[in-house]
Structures are given as C-alpha cells and as structure tokens.
Image (tube, grey):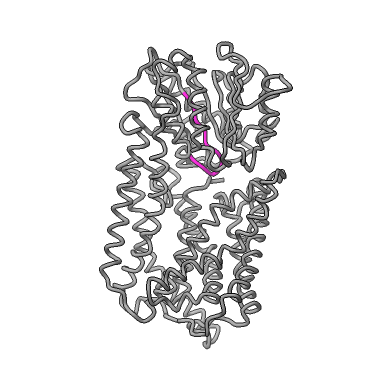
Amino acid sequence: MGGRKLPREPRYIALFILSVVLASAIYMGWSAERALGEVAVGDFQIVRANGRTVDFSVFKPRTQTYSGPLPAVLTIHGISASRDAMLPFNTELARRNFTVVSVDLAGHGVSSETFSFSTFLEVAKDAYEAVRYVQLSDPGTSNFTYGVLGHSLGAGVALLMQAMPVQPNATVIIGGGIGENFGGLSLPLNQTHPQNLMIACGLYDELVSPASAIESLKTATGLSDVNENTTYGSFLNGTARKLVLSNTDHLFEMSDPVIVTQSVDWMGRSLQGVHQLEQHTLSPSSHIYQYATIAVAIQSSSVLLAVLPLFLITYSILPLKLRPTRAQNDLPELSTRRSLESSFLIGVFAGVLFLSIMLMGLMLEFAGLALIPVSFGTTLTLYSIIMYFVVGFSVRWLLGRKPEHAGDDAGSDDRRKLALHDLSRSLVLLIPVIVWLFLWSWLSSSLAGIRLAATPQTTGAASLERAAYTGVLTLTLLPLFYADAVWLDGVAKVTSGWSSLFSLSKKCVGVIVYRLAGFGIVVGLLYIPFLAGAQLGFIMFVALLMLPFAVLFGFSALVTLWVGGLTKNLLAAALLNAFLLAMIVASTFEII
C-alpha cells in the first residue's frame, strides 16, 4: 500500500474465497455433527415447574443395533462453554445406540437464565429435568437407565445427579468434580456412589492434578494402592471404578481421542453390557468427531479473516468525506532493538496487569459485583481503563516521543471534535462488518442448526441481551485498543502502510512479536513451575483463561496493522478491534 493503490479485484476475490470456505466449513460441521448421516439432531427447550427454562440438544442414531429402548446419556459442559463443546461425546455416543441429551447450563450458550454459584443446585436440576423429559416423552429411550458425563464445572454437576430422584447408572467426570464440595454443595463420592464411576483428566490439566485424581480413585474404591487404566469393582452391581490419564491439558480434554474412546467404552459397558458392546456396537476408537473440530476451526478463522477484505472494500467505495481523517506517523522508525525492548517491558506489565485484574474481576463476579453482567466483562473493562493510561505514559517514557496524529496541534476542544468526527466515520466503516457477522450467524443457525463461533448470537431468548452487552463492551474496550494501536504505531509505524507483500508479512510478524512477547513471558513463567510439578491452584485457572485472550490480542494486532495502514487512522482500528472482542466475549461467555 504505502502510497500505491492495490487493484480492486484481489479484495473481492479474497472475500469470495473466504465466503466459499466458510459455507463449506458450515456444511462440513453440519455433516460431522450428524456423523455423516448416522445421527439425527434436534434442539429443544422446556420450562420447569418453577419457571426456569432449559435449552438442550438431543442426538439419536438414525438406525440402531440395540434391542429395546436406548439408554440415555446426559452430557454437561464446563464453565464459559456450551453444549457445542461436548460434540465429540454427543456424536460418538449417539453412533453407538445412545440417546444423548446435551444441555446449556444456566447463562451459557443460548440459555436465557443467569449463572450463579448461589443457585448451583438449580443448575443441576435443570440438567436433570432435561434428561428426564427426554426419557419420559420419547418411547425409543429408556425411562430409567441413563448415564451422565461432565467436564470441569460439568463434572461437579454430574456428581450432583446423586441428589436427584432417579440416579444415573454410570458417571464419567473429566477434569473436574475432584474434592469434597462444589459450589457450596457436598459432592458424593464413596465405594458405592456414584454407580460405575470413571475419572479422567489430562496429565497437564491445569486444574486437576493426576495426584488428586488418584486420591479420588482411592476414595471411590476404598483401596490404598490403585493404578490408572485398571477397572476395579463390577459393572453388574454398579461398583466399577477406573482412572484414565491422557497426554493433554484442561482445554483439550473434551476432544482428546483417548478420553473420548474410554468414555464411550465406559458408557457402553455400564449401560448396554459387554456383549452388546463387543458384538453389536462400533469400536469405541472409531471416530468421526474430528471433522467437526476441524470445521469449527475453519469457520471461526474464515469468518474473522473475511472482515479484512470486507473492510477494505467498504473503505474503497466510501466517498472521501465519509472516511476517517488520515494521519500517517512520519517520525523516523525506531531500531528493532529499541522497539523490542520497549514492547517487552510494556507487554510484561500488560500480562501481569491482566493476570491481576482477572483474579480481581472473577472475585467480583463471583461476589455478584459485576460491572457488566457477562463473564470477563468486569475484567476487560478495568483492564481497558488502566491500560489506556499506562500505555499513554509508557509510549512517552520508553519511546521518548508521542506518535503524531491528526489534530495534535489543535486545541483540546478541536481534538475532541475531531475524535468524535473520526469515531462516527469509523462507525460507518464498521456497519458492513456487523451486518456480515450477523448474516452469517443467522444463516448458519437457521439453515444448518450450527451455532457459528466468533459471531453474534441470533437465536435464543438471550440474543438481544447479548447484543446489548456487545454494545456496552465495545465502548469500554475502545480505550484498550486505542492504547494498543498507539503502542504498535510507536514501535512499528502501522499507519505508514506497506509497499509489498514481503513488507506486509514482515510487519505482521513484527506486530505480533511486539504485542505478545511480554504477555507470553508472563504466561510462560506460570506454566514452567506448573509443568515442573508445582500446584498453583486458582492462579493456573486464570493462566489457562489467559491463553485464548492471547490469541485474540494477537489477531487484534494484525487488525491494527491492516486497518491502520489502510485508513491512517488509529481510532478506526481500535473501534473494529473493540467490537470484535466485545462480540466474542458477549456471545461466548456466560451471563451472570
């Protein structure tokens, strides 16, 4: 770019190709979710007697090799996830003669309820009511025989099924449910309850250590010496116990092939019997779910990458009077060493600050003192405000200068007017992006029944509420991403654009390194002692949560480079980044 116009055709071709890739990935995800035609999927909502609504999906085999009504399996996701996260288990179990009921816990997914640990037993009852509704209303599903499988938070909910009128005949807890209580409620774990218990976790699980899982197995068996991958007790009398460990961490346990295989095998032996499992059921290790996992990755990446050519097209067709003010940074470029040193210091501080504020923000949310009633909204709001001032000071102190922008020589009133002027024009550029994301989300949900990741929610009673939170979060995140843009412009001159594909690639690598180097050091310093065997407790939970945000901050750096180089305006880049992160947070995480 840098003074030379790019031909228009490539931007349209790029948008077209990404649209085709996205549509293909949606179809791929739809097919994989249904096991390439082997499984039927339906979405349901029930209203409990107390007025609480429960949203869930039901997976059933189109053809079965099981004599009699199918056993049911209730699958329960972890915190900040949804029923979509349980797809590997849902699809693979349904392929093997199970009716699978997968719920959205309160506040998660499309649920219109709010999530709170103070009402945690009601959350468990929601899940129980969903599986019982299916068992009692579907003649092809057993009235009483069912199992429950939960991950992380869902593992605790799974154990609470012991407090329900009809208790499960098999339980699988993955990466959670370890300890004496959960959400203020006692978790039953002894030699007879729950029936046929399998415990699973990753060797590198940040929240559940293999040692604690082994202790839980000792409690469940009554033995002082136990081993992994060994079945204790009997399936016939409900005392079967087993521990499965795999080379994975907490985030990837839900799609780990070892854990999926062992979970499917356990449910088959517990609920259908060994003869049925070995003679009339697919091998537990024969999987299709990986195609859905790949499809989700392609969906989210293609829908976000398409924002870049779409933004370029919008900018190119806008009249000059509707474009944000151009203000290229013409100061001499800093040396690579000084840019790295400065960015490293800012990044380390940003990482420590994010870790600290996330700890504080989660505590405030758990105490019912959230600034914005969506998980991580409080953390991001506080982080945004503090980082705005920190980066402003750091750019002057570490870089010894302030990047030049339009209006710097004007008075304060003129600067405010210019900022509002640029903000309104940047909003015009944002409108096609908003329409694009909403349109694809609606098409995916309504035509394919696929809830598209990294897009706004367009289905469910909470969709309007989440849209409102997106707007509020966009405003609160604007200072953070404007500070980021000023920082990256100071060290990488993003507003100077690029002259070739090579210079663009070089700048892409540069802005990611500048933005994430210090942040990555902070995360690494937490993981090094963890991998060495140190138990850091809740701090590792926060470190785990920092990983997806690091990916998002890396993507935002690329957006800043692209939009900043195109518009020569940092506010336009900041607004787009603020909206994208606000949309992802408000559409993905739980309402509290």
Which quadrant is the C terminus positioned in? top right
Magenta includes 80? Answer: yes
**Depicted 583 relative to depicted 495: above or below:** above
Viewer-proximal residue among 545 and 365: 545
Viewer-proximal residue among 218 and 356: 218
Viewer-proximal residue among 411 and 450: 450
Q: Can the viewer see residue 112 in this picture?
A: yes
Q: Residue at x 65, y 37 (%)?
A: 208
Which x, y percent locates residue 150?
55, 32
Locate residue 447 relative to residue 176 in the image: left or right: left
Provide the major secondary structure of the magenta segment: loop
Q: Which residues are magenta?
A: 73-82
Which x, y percent locates residue 360?
68, 53
Which x, y percent locates residue 320?
33, 79
In the figure, residue 217 lies in which quadrant?
top right
**Depicted 310 relative to depicted 138: above or below:** below
Which x, y percent locates residue 419?
48, 77
Magenta includes 391? Answer: no
Q: Residue at x 52, y 87 (%)?
A: 410
Which quadrant is the N terminus positioned in? bottom left
Q: Residue at x 38, y 49 (%)?
A: 299
Q: Can the viewer see residue 122 in this picture?
A: no
Q: Residue at x 55, y 77 (%)?
A: 490
